[in-house]
Image: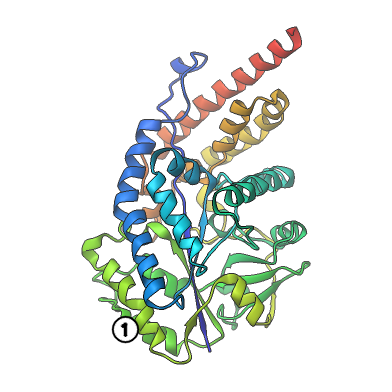
């Protein structure tokens, strides 16, 4: 009986103020509250509010048989608490149904694992505490930023007590094997759920494409594809903003979602499960060996979306170098700013490669060019470095 596992990434970054060289040392704020509120209001109205309500209705209509899971980043949770408590309450109501599972990730949706394992652990613990405080649950499943994964990631996560981790189902790693089974990591006891990117992208990327041979995608058609899929589990992982934002209401995406659980449950051999239920029900079929850092980003499924060109590499190198000086200040404001600057989106905006899914880089991007994004980011780093030095000097004097 194949089990369908729906997982949604829910994230919005804290965007940066326009910051010129003339702003360095002037005490200007790094983060653009006005712009962040503008984007978040639109996304809450078009996606979070209607989709949360629909999921709640679907769970009730199916007597809890329809199940989904979320990873909601810490930086988004902070914004929702401050500006949209009604949206925050709707996520809490979903979790309270018992049919919705939450996962942990890095608090800042950051590239922390590529900075240091200690920094990575700290941000994961921060997110764990935030989820516990808001929802009263302790997640057992982990999902790294943009599903970044390697054997080393699995080892660290396993040592932190997580039973399972989300990863991309990479063709070059799987070979002849299917992502539709539970796998085990190499060098650790961590279990793995692999994204079926073909079926996931049918919804998140291709749903409204009239050039796609599968258009129009209806709930009964997609359910029939799931019914015919081989294996034991079908992992459908995607951005939550797929509903109403990436795919607008006019595309019929909400009608699709509204009818999908009913169409899936028509098949006696299909059901819905959360990740924790899956790892209790199924046994791993094989190991999944990834010695390098992979991800679900772009056609290359690696870290090149953030770290391919010289601008990205230089910016990332500088944020790493700045870490020791900022942490030594023990100033919560400076440390928080340094960690927000690790968010993967800032490096996305500097991307210069445009492939089939290049629009992901453009979406919610407030910069005209990647070069503008780079210069703006580096000006803020220069200012943060100066503030860290000033804080260190002031501490010595006192």
**Direction bottom: furthest residue:** 268
Out of 358 and 121, give the one closest to the viewer: 121
Q: Is residue 386 left or right of residue 396?
A: left
Figure disc tally: 1
Which quarter of the figure has residue 218? bottom left
**Residue 179 position by quadrant:** bottom right
- Which residue is more in the foreground, 89 or 387? 89
Looking at the image, residue 85 lies above or below residue 333: below
Image location of residue 150, percent across then percent down: 67, 61
Picture coordinates of residue 378, whole percent (x, y): 52, 29
**Rendered location of residue 3, percent (x, y):** 52, 81
Q: Circle 1 — which element?
A: helix
In the displayed structure, does residue 271 sit left or right of residue 181? Answer: left
Which quadrant of the rendered structure holds the C terminus?
A: top right
Residue at left offset 70%, top offset 23%? 329
Left or right: where 93 falls relative to 115: left
Residue at the image position 63 percent from the left and 47 percent from the top: 129
Q: Relative to 8, is 35 above or below?
A: above
Residue occupying the point 69% across, 70% down: 289
Q: Is residue 96 visible?
A: yes
Residue bearing mark 1:
220
Could you tell me residue 202's position as x and y percent?
A: 37, 72
Tell me, yes or no, if residue 367 can be seen here.
no
Indicate whether 196 appears above or below 51: below
- Residue ID at (69%, 42%): 119
Residue situated furthest top in the rendering: 397
State how the image is colored.
rainbow
| Mark 1 Cα-neighbour bin, 10 Å: few <14, some 14–19, many ≥20 | some
């Amino acid at each position: 009986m194949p089990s369908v596992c729906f997982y949604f990434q829910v994230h919005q970054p804290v965007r940066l103020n326009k910051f010129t060289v003339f702003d360095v040392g002037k005490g200007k704020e790094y983060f653009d509250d006005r712009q962040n509120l503008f984007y978040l209001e639109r996304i809450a109205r078009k996606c979070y509010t209607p989709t949360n309500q629909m999921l709640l209705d679907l769970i009730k209509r199916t007597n809890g048989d329809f199940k989904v899971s979320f990873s909601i980043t810490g930086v988004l949770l902070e914004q929702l608490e401050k500006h949209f408590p009604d949206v925050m309450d709707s996520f809490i109501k979903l979790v309270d149904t018992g049919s919705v599972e939450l996962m942990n990730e890095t608090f800042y949706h950051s590239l922390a694992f590529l900075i240091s394992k200690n920094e990575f652990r700290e941000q994961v613990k921060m997110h764990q505490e935030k989820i516990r405080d808001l929802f009263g649950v302790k997640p057992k499943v982990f999902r790294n930023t943009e599903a970044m994964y390697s054997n080393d990631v699995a080892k660290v996560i396993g040592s932190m007590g997580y039973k399972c981790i989300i990863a991309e189902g990479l063709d070059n790693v799987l070979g002849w094997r299917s992502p539709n089974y539970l796998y085990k990591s190499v060098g650790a006891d961590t279990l793995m759920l692999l994204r079926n990117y073909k079926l996931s992208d049918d919804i998140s990327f291709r749903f409204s494409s009239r050039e796609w041979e599968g258009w129009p995608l209806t709930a009964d058609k997609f359910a029939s594809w799931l019914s015919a899929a081989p294996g034991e589990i079908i992992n459908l992982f995607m951005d939550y903003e797929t509903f109403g934002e990436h795919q607008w209401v006019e595309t019929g995406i909400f009608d699709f979602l509204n009818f999908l659980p009913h169409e899936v449950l028509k098949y006696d051999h299909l059901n819905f499960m959360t990740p924790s239920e899956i790892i209790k029900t199924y046994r791993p079929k094989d190991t999944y060996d990834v010695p390098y850092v992979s991800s679900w980003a772009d056609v290359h499924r690696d870290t090149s979306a953030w770290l391919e060109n010289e601008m990205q590499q230089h910016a990332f190198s500088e944020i790493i170098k700045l870490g020791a000086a900022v942490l030594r200040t023990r100033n919560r404001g400076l440390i928080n700013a340094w960690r927000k600057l690790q968010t993967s989106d800032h490096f996305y905006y500097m991307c210069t490669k445009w492939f089939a899914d290049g629009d992901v880089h453009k979406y919610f991007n407030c910069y005209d060019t990647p070069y503008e994004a780079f210069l703006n980011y580096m000006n803020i780093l220069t200012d943060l470095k100066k503030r860290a030095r000033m804080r260190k000097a002031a501490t010595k004097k006192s």
